[in-house]
Amino acid sequence: MRILHSMLRVNDLKESIDFYQNIFGMKVLRQKDYPEGKFSLAFMGYGGEKEVTVIELTHNWGTDNYDHGNAFGHIAIEVDDVYIACEEIKIKGGNVVREAGPMMGSKLLLAFVEDPNGYKIELIQKDTF
C-alpha cells in the first residue's frame, strides 16, 4: 500500500494550478472536467502518480468558498534551504505566514506558506527532521 494523493477543494482551479506551478514548481499531471458531476480535477506533483504522492485539486462548479473546519492541518514540502525558499516564494508573490526558523524546542527548520484558498503548506528544510 501507499498514499496516492491528498485532495484539496479549491475556489478557482486556474488560480490554484498557477500557484502550485509558479510558487512550488509542481507540474499538472492530468486535468479533466466532469460536466455531469459539475466538477473539475487537476492532479499536481513533482513526478508521476505511479512514483510519488500528488495533490488533487478539486473545483466544484458554482462553489466559490469552502469551510475548512478545524481538523485539516497542512501539506509539507521538503526544501534544500527554508530561508532561501521563503525569499523566492515572496518574490513570486506567495504569502509566507510563518517566517523561516527553528521549531520551538527542536532543530527542525521550517516555515509556512498559505495558498490562495487559505490552505497551509509547511516548508521543512532537508536534513533537519
Image (tube, grey):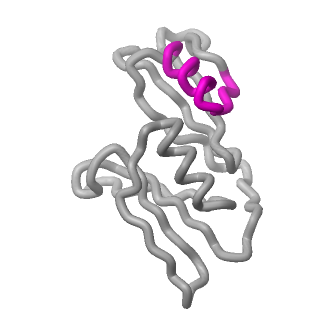
Q: Which image quarter: residue 64?
A: bottom right
> Closest to the observer: 13 or 101?
13
Outermost residue toward the bottom in this view: 36
The residue that appears at 56% across and 21% down in the rendered structure is 86
Please name the residue shown 29% across and 47% down the image.
Answer: 47
- Image position, residue 8 (x, y; %): 57, 57
Q: Quadrant of the C terminus?
A: top left
Q: Is residue 49 left or right of residue 123?
A: left
Looking at the image, can residue 23 be seen? yes
Q: Does 25 appear in magenta?
A: no
Residue 46 point in image, percent of width and height:
34, 44
Image x and y of residue 73, in percent: 61, 42
Residue under the point 53% across and 20% down: 110
**Residue 129, can we see it?**
no
Q: Say which of 93 and 8 sits in front.
A: 93
> Left or right: 101 with respect to 84?
right
Query: Residue at position x 60%, y 24% from top?
Result: 91
Q: Is residue 81 above or below residue 56?
A: above
Question: Eyeballing the image, is 60 above or below 74?
Answer: below
Numbered label tally: 0
Out of 69 and 86, give the one closest to the viewer: 86
Which quadrant holds the N terminus?
bottom left
Question: With respect to residue 89, does 44 lie above or below?
Answer: below
Horizontally, residue 29 falls left or right of residue 36, namely: left
Q: Is residue 92 above or below residue 68?
A: above
| Residue 9 position in % (x across, y down) | 61, 61
The front one of 42 and 98 is: 42
Magenta stretch: give its range.
83-98
